[in-house]
Amino acid sequence: MTSAPVPVDEEERLAALRSYEVLDTLAEDQFDALTHLAASTCGTPVALISLIDRDRQWFKSAVGLEGISQTPRDEAFCAHAILGDQVFQVADARQDVRFADNPLVTGPLQMRFYAGMPLITPAGQALGTLCVLGRTARELSQDQEGTLRQLAALAMNLLESRRLRKEAERLQVNLSEELSVARQVMARLVGQNALQQDHLRYRILPAGRFSGDVVAGARSPEGRLHMLLGDVTGHGLGSGLYLIPAMEAFYRLAEKGFTLPMIARELNRKLKGLLPVGHFMAAAIAVVDEPGRSVSLWNGGSPPVLFISAAGDLQFSAPAKHLALGILADAEFDDSVQSFTWEGPGQLWMYSDGLVEAENTKGEPLGAEAVLTVLQRTPPGERLDQLFEAVTRFTAGIAHADDVSVAVLNLAGPSPS
C-alpha cells in the first residue's frame, strides 16, 4: 500500500479545514442528500463526503458505510484525490500497486472502484472529496463524471454557507452591527476593487439582509473596464452565496484579458453547475474601451443597458438578447455580443429588474419609461440620486420585494485636438 504524498500546502490546508468547524459534527440532511444523489447517479453502493484531517479521513456524510465515521489517512483513496483539482478515478484497485493491499480493498468492504472530486475552497485548498466507491471494476461515464463534479461544487458551497453561518452566530453584537459585518464579509468575498473610480458610481439596495444582486468591475491587462451587473433568482443569503464562485470567475477571466464571449460562456457554465433547478442569474456584462470610445455588451435577462448623452438623449439601448446565465447547457449557449460607439460625453447605465418592478401602494410597477424619464430630464451629475429619490417617492416607503441595483459609468467624448 502506497500512502499519498502530503500536499505542499498541508499546514495551510489543515488550517482552512479547521476554519470550517465541521469535523466531528452531526449528520445534516443537505449533505446526506448529495451523497445519496451521487450514489444513485453513479450506480455505486457507497458515496461519501470525506474530509482529510492530519491523521484520518472523517466522513461528514456516508451512504453504504453504516457505522463507520472515519478511517486512517494512510488508507484513504481521498488522500490521493486531494492532490489534484479534477475527478480522480481508480478503475480497479486490485490492479493498482497503490491500493492493491489496502484494507478497504482486501478487507470485508472489498472495494475495487473509486472516483472522487476534491472539495476546493475559494482560496484553493482541497479539504476532502465527494466520492463514490464500488465493488466491481469500472469507470464513470462522461455524464456521471460531470455530475460528480457538480455535486462536489454544491457540497463545497454548503460548507462555505455553513462556515458563514457559524461566523454570524459568533457575533455578540446588536443586529445592525451583525448586518454590517456580514455585508463586509460578502463584499470582501465578491470583491469590488475596480469600482472605486471617480467616473463610476453604483448603488445596491437589498430587499433582505443580504443582496442577491452584484455590481462588479475589473480591468483587463489592456486597460479595458469590464463591468457586470447580476441578479440571482431570489434575494438574501442563499442567493448571495451563489454569487461568490461566479464573481471569482469573472474577476479571474477579466483580469487575464479573456474576451467578453468567453467570460459570458464560462459564467454560464459555472452557474449551470451550481444553481438549483429553476434558479439563474440575469446579467448584463459590458466591456468598455474608453480610448476607443466603444462598448461591447452581453445581456441575458436583464433590463436594457442604456447610453444617455450629457444632454439627455438616449443614444443606445441594448435589450436582453439572451436567456439568463445558468439556464442553458454549454452547447446551446449563445455568446454573441452587441456593440456600439459613442462620440460626445455621456453615461452608460445598467440596472436590475428590481428597479423597474418597484411597486407603489396600488401594486403598480415603476416601469422602464419612468426610469428613462428621470435620467433624460436630470443633469448627469444628479441622475443617480434623483433616480433613487424618485423610487422612494413612488413606493411611499413600501419595502422592496426584490433587490435594486444600479451602476452608472461616466464616459468622456473625444479629447480636444
Image (tube, rainbow, N blue to C red):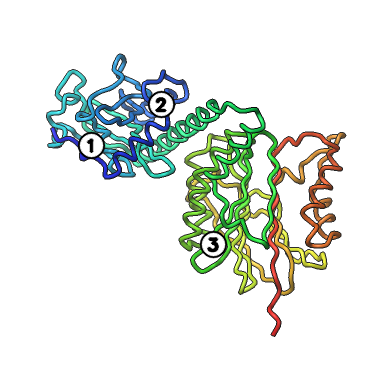
> Measured from the top left, where is residue 189 in percent x and y?
52, 44
Q: Which sits in the foreground, 206 or 272?
A: 206
Secondary structure beneath label 1:
strand
Residue visible at 35% across and 31% down in the picture: 42
Numbered badge on residue 219 = 3
**Callout 3: 10 Å neighbours few (<14), some, many (20+)?**
many
The kind of residue tagged 3 is Arg
Quarter placement of the N terminus: top left
Q: Which sits in the foreground, 144 or 164?
A: 164
The kind of residue tagged 2 is Val
Identify whether 91 is placed above or below 251: above
> Measured from the top left, where is residue 14 in percent x and y?
33, 35
Rounded to the nearest angstrom, the CA distance separating label 1 from label 3 is 42 Å
Identify the residue position indicated by label 2 in the image.
22
Residue visible at 47% across and 24% down in the picture: 30
> Measured from the top left, where is residue 185 in percent x and y?
55, 40
Secondary structure beneath label 3:
strand
Identify the residue position indicated by label 1 in the image.
90
Rounded to the nearest angstrom, the CA distance separating label 2 from label 1 is 27 Å
Identify whether 194 is placed above or below 140: below
Quarter placement of the C terminus: bottom right
Numbered badge on residue 45 = none
Q: Nearer the viewer, mark 2 or mark 1?
A: 2
Which tag, 3 or 2, sits closer to the chain's start? 2
Please, which residue is most extreme toward the bottom here?
A: 417
